[in-house]
């Protein structure tokens, strides 16, 4: 998906670990219960990161792996933003700032039906510049939507500039808490820290919950990590092969380091 038209590779890699963790260890969502009203819900509000979601769906058997080759082709609905014609996609997104409110509506519906669904919405930190986000945070707190979890992909970039250079967000934890949300912080690439954080979330909280996950744009590919010019990428096929080699080489190095640490 990063070639022949490209996609938001750098942005997607910042939240890949978050999405993998949520679907593998936290959410009650799988290929067999996508229409079950008692399933959990994930809304990807930063819709341009959908390649991370498609890739996870392929690993989980929700979407056929071969189907990803249809990216940007006219014979399918796989393109730069989520489309509900793809199994597992709960709602269209792409125009930032919208899906927190959609998730709030689903959250309220589930509460009215006395269901125990978890409703998760992934927000970009640059997306927090949208005023509709802060309106939604206030309303969710006022309505005590305690089945709602906002996960902020805090990669510190707004498109092609750092968030703190454009419209500073910090102190972000204090802001969420002042809007009535019970707030946690974690390393969005450390599965042990993710597990510790999500395991510590109260099962019956009094407030909506927020998890601010510290992440790195382009995580896993050192040559494009934390680069302002690697938000959207359209690589050549040769460049993709080089990046895959870089990814797997780093993976082997990391595994070797972990083995040495254990010893």
Image (tube, rainbow, N blue to C red):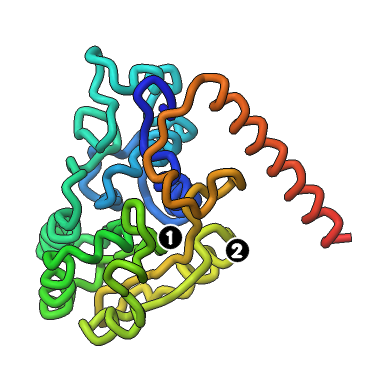
6 relative to 16, above or below: above
Q: Residue at x 66, y 31 (%)?
A: 245
261 relative to 94, above or below: below
Q: Secondary structure at mark 2?
A: helix
Is tag 1's residue or tag 2's residue first in the polypeptide sequence? 1
Badge 2: residue crowd in 10 Å (few <14, some 14–19, many ≥20)? few
Quadrant position of the N terminus in the picture = top left
Q: Residue 106: image x %, image y %?
A: 15, 56
Badge 1: residue crowd in 10 Å (few <14, some 14–19, many ≥20)? many
Q: Determine if residue 68 is in view.
A: yes
Mark 1 to mark 2: distance in Å? 19 Å
In the picture, measured across the screen, residue 231 lies left or right of residue 130, that is right
Q: Residue 112: image x %, image y %?
A: 10, 64
Quadrant position of the C terminus in the picture = bottom right
Mark 1 vs mark 2: give the one in front. Answer: 1
Q: Residue at x 27, y 70 (%)?
A: 167
Q: Residue at x 25, y 37 (%)?
A: 82
Q: Determine if residue 21 is in view.
A: no
The label shown at residue 70 is none
178 relative to 103, above or below: below
Q: Secondary structure at mark 1?
A: loop
Q: Quadrant of residue 233?
A: top left
In the picture, measured across the screen, residue 218 lies left or right of residue 81, that is right
Q: Quadrant of residue 239?
A: top right
Question: Label 1, on which residue?
Answer: 155
Q: Residue 143: image x %, image y %?
A: 11, 76
Q: Residue at x 25, y 52 (%)?
A: 45
Along the line of sight, the residue nearer the viewer: 94 or 108: 94
The label shown at residue 192 is 2
Q: Residue 168: image x %, image y %?
A: 31, 74
């Amino acid at each position: 998906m990063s070639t022949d038209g490209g996609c938001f590779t750098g942005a997607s890699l910042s939240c890949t670990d978050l999405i993998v963790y949520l679907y593998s260890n936290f959410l009650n969502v799988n290929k067999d219960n996508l229409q079950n009203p008692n399933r959990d819900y994930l809304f990807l509000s930063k819709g341009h990161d959908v390649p991370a979601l498609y890739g996870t769906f392929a690993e989980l058997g929700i979407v056929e792996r071969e189907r990803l080759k249809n990216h940007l082709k006219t014979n399918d609905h796989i393109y730069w933003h989520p489309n509900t014609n793809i199994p597992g996609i709960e709602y269209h997104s792409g125009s930032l700032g919208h899906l927190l409110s959609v998730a709030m509506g689903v959250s309220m519906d589930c509460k009215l039906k006395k269901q125990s669904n978890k409703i998760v919405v992934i927000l970009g930190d640059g997306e927090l510049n949208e005023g509709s986000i802060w309106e939604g945070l206030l309303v969710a707190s006022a309505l005590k939507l305690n089945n709602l979890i906002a996960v902020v992909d805090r990669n510190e970039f707004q498109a092609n500039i750092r968030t703190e250079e454009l419209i500073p967000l910090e102190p972000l934890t204090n802001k969420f808490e002042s809007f009535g949300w019970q707030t946690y912080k974690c390393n969005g690439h450390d599965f042990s820290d993710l597990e510790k954080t999500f395991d510590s979330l109260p099962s019956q909280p009094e407030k909506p919950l927020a998890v601010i996950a510290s992440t790195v744009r382009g995580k896993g590919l050192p040559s494009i990590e934390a680069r302002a010019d690697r938000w959207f990428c359209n690589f050549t096929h040769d460049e993709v092969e080089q990046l895959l080699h870089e990814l797997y080489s780093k993976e082997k190095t990391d595994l070797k380091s972990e083995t040495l640490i254990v010893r």
